[in-house]
Image (cartoon, helix red, strand yellow):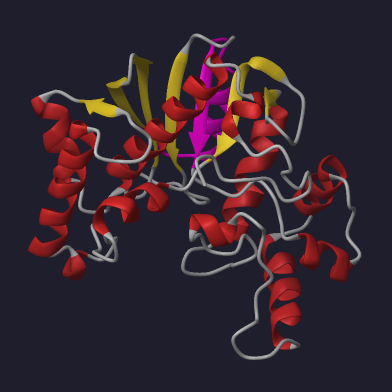
C-alpha cells in the first residue's frame, strides 16, 4: 500500500514563469487533507526531473492519459496503449493539429470531436482538442514524461508502484460546488470580483467537506490567501487535484482495485479519477 505523499498537479503543456506547472503536495488522514505546499515548475525538463525523484506518492494530474478509441481506430493508429503513446510522442504538435483538424473537418456539425467514455461523466473536454484548452498537446507533453520516469499508471501501464499517477480533472469537483459559476481566468480583464467570490466559496466548501468525496481540505491562513489571490485558478486547480488524489489513495487503502477506477475502464482510453 502506498503511504507517501499525495500530489495534485495543474499542468501546462508549455510552462513558463507566468504560466507554470503547479504542484500541490500534502497528506491525508481520517478524511482530512492537509495541504503542505505549492510548488511552481517553469519547464517540462524540470517537471521530468521532479517525476524522477525517489519518493512515494499518489498523484492526480490534470491532463489526459489516453485518446478516444473511435479516433484511434479511424486513423489506424496502434490499438495498445504503450504502442499508441509511443506513436503519439513521435509526432510533432503541428502534425497532431493537422491530423485532428482533418478528422474533425470530415464530421458533421455538433459531432466534430471523438470522445472517450470518461468525458461524459466527467464533463471534460475531448482529449483530441488542440485549442481552448489544448489538452491534446498536454497529453503529448505529459504522458511521455510519466513513462520516462517509470511511474505506475493504474489500468494503463505497470510501473513503479511507489509512484502512482492518475488522470484528474479539477473542473469535475469545482462544478459540484459552483455549478456553472466561473472561478478563474488567465485573462486579466476577466479576473472579476465575481470569480474572486467563487474561489472563496469553493475553498470554503472544500474546507467544510461539502463534496461527494467526503474529504475536508486543511489549509493555513497564508495558503488560503494564495488560493484565493491566484486569479488564474492554477493553485486552486492543483488543490482540487490533490483532493482527487486523496480520494484515490483512500480507495486503495480500503482495498479498492485500481485506486477507485471502474473495473471496465477501456485500456486504450483511460479514465478520470472520481468520475
Q: Is residue 54 magenta?
A: yes
Q: Is residue 101 above or below residue 6?
A: below
User: What is the quadrant of the N terminus in the image?
Assistant: top right
* Magenta run includes residue 151: no
Q: Residue 61 placed where, x, y %?
A: 51, 38
- Reply above or below: 12 against 59: below
- Total marks placed: 0
Q: Which residues are magenta?
A: 40-61
Q: Is residue 209 left or right of residue 165?
A: left
User: Measuring 72% from the left and 75% from the top, which residue is drawn there?
Assistant: 98
Q: Tell me the quarter of the picture where residue 185 sits.
A: bottom left
In the picture provided, is 196 more to the left or to the right than 245? left
Query: Would you identify the image quadrant in which residue 162 lies?
Result: top right
Q: Position of residue 195 (x, y in %)?
A: 16, 60
Left or right, 96 with respect to 79, comes to left
* Residue 182 placement (x, y as % from top left): 25, 63
Q: Which residue does the image show at 58% across and 31% down from the upper left?
A: 260
* Image-quadrant location for residue 135: bottom right
Amino acid at each position: 500500500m502506498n503511504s507517501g505523499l499525495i500530489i495534485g498537479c495543474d499542468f501546462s503543456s508549455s510552462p513558463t514563469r507566468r504560466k507554470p506547472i503547479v504542484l500541490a503536495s500534502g497528506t491525508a488522514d481520517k478524511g482530512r487533507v492537509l495541504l503542505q505546499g505549492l510548488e511552481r515548475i517553469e519547464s517540462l525538463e524540470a517537471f521530468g526531473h521532479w517525476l524522477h525523484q525517489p519518493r512515494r506518492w499518489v498523484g492526480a494530474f490534470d491532463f489526459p492519459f489516453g485518446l478516444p478509441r473511435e479516433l484511434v481506430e479511424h486513423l489506424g493508429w496502434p490499438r495498445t496503449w504503450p504502442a499508441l503513446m509511443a506513436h503519439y510522442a513521435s509526432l510533432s504538435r503541428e502534425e497532431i493539429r493537422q491530423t485532428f483538424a482533418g478528422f474533425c473537418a470530415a464530421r458533421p456539425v455538433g459531432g466534430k470531436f471523438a470522445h472517450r467514455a470518461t468525458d461524459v461523466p466527467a464533463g471534460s473536454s475531448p482529449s483530441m482538442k488542440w485549442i481552448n484548452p489544448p489538452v491534446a498537446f498536454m497529453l503529448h507533453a505529459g504522458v511521455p514524461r510519466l513513462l520516462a520516469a517509470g511511474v505506475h499508471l493504474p489500468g494503463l501501464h505497470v510501473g513503479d508502484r511507489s509512484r502512482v499517477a492518475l488522470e484528474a480533472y479539477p473542473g469535475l469537483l469545482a462544478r459540484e460546488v459552483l455549478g456553472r459559476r466561473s472561478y478563474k481566468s488567465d485573462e486579466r480583464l476577466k479576473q472579476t470580483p465575481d470569480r474572486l467570490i467563487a474561489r472563496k466559496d469553493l475553498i470554503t466548501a472544500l474546507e467544510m467537506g461539502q463534496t461527494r468525496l467526503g474529504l475536508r481540505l486543511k489549509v493555513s491562513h497564508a495558503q488560503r490567501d494564495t488560493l484565493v489571490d491566484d486569479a488564474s485558478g492554477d493553485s486552486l486547480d492543483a488543490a482540487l487535484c490533490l483532493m482527487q488524489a486523496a480520494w484515490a489513495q483512500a480507495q486503495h487503502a480500503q482495498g479498492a482495485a485500481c485506486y477507485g477506477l471502474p473495473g471496465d475502464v477501456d485500456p486504450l482510453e483511460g479514465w478520470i479519477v472520481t468520475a
